Amino acid sequence: MFFNRIWGLYTQPKIQWHRVDSQHDSLNYSLTHLALIALIPAISAYFSLAHLGWNLGSNSNEAIFFSPAQALGLAIILYVGLVAGVFALAYLIFWMARTFGASPNFSHSIELAAYAATPLFMAGLVLFYPKLIVVMVVGLAGLAYSTYLLHSGIPIVMRIPPERGFIYAMSVITGAWVLLLCAIVAAIMLWSWGFMYMM
């Protein structure tokens, strides 16, 4: 069911959202999905930082490596940040729901946030090819599809009319982008911190 759900989000997202709405997963299942899918970028980041090296596109072809301990620390922080980000998105969805006439429980909000974040997290596989421009392009594609999933899933899972669903989705997406911007700033700071201690 796990892989069927993920595949359905890519091939038939609206049909899959209706299935999610009619067969809501338990909170434990949603949390397990989130815990597993967030491992993809964390493990990929560890492996690329410690073993492959990063090419930032400078004139030199010399790759930047972190020690295994530093890479593990940054990967753990990335993992915790990703999970926390999904929880923050779920809380945002839950908090805004009553404004738009929806009445979900928090489990439904976690489910929606976790499934919507799946393409962005799966784009983390690109970290096995750590070229900055490639990572940026694939990351933006994952982000765009996650945004689409959030936009298409909110009216269905929250069971509100499409016209209100559009405004609700746009409000949540705006909040999600602010969260993402904060995460990017934090990631840059962590990268600088790791690079400073690598010297």
Image: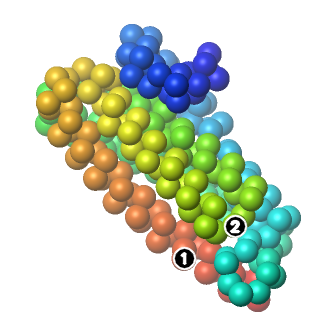
Image quadrant containing the C terminus: bottom right
Image position, residue 24 (x, y; %): 43, 16
Image quadrant containing the N terminus: top right
Quarter of the image for residue 47 reads bottom right
Name the amino acid type tagged 1.
Met
Determine whether 1 is above or below 177 in the image: above
Q: Earlier in the sequence, mark 1 or mark 2?
A: 2
Determine whether 130 is above or below 148 in the image: below
| Crowd rating for badge 2 (residues with CA inside 10 Å; few <14, some 14–19, many 20+) | some
Image position, residue 182 (x, y; %): 41, 65
Q: Which residue is mark 2?
A: 131
Which residue is found at the position 45% from the left and 42% from the top? 146
Image position, residue 156 (x, y; %): 30, 22
Q: Secondary structure at mark 2?
A: loop
Left or right of 68? Residue 10 is left
Q: Nearer the viewer, residue 21 or 29?
A: 21
- Residue that protrudes farthest toward the top in the picture: 22
Residue at mark 1 to residue at mark 2: CA–CA distance: 20 Å
Left or right of 187? Residue 149 is left
Residue 30 shows up from this direction:
no
Name the amino acid type tagged 2.
Lys
* Res. 189 mark: 1
Q: Are marks 1 and 2 in contact (CB under 8 Å)?
A: no
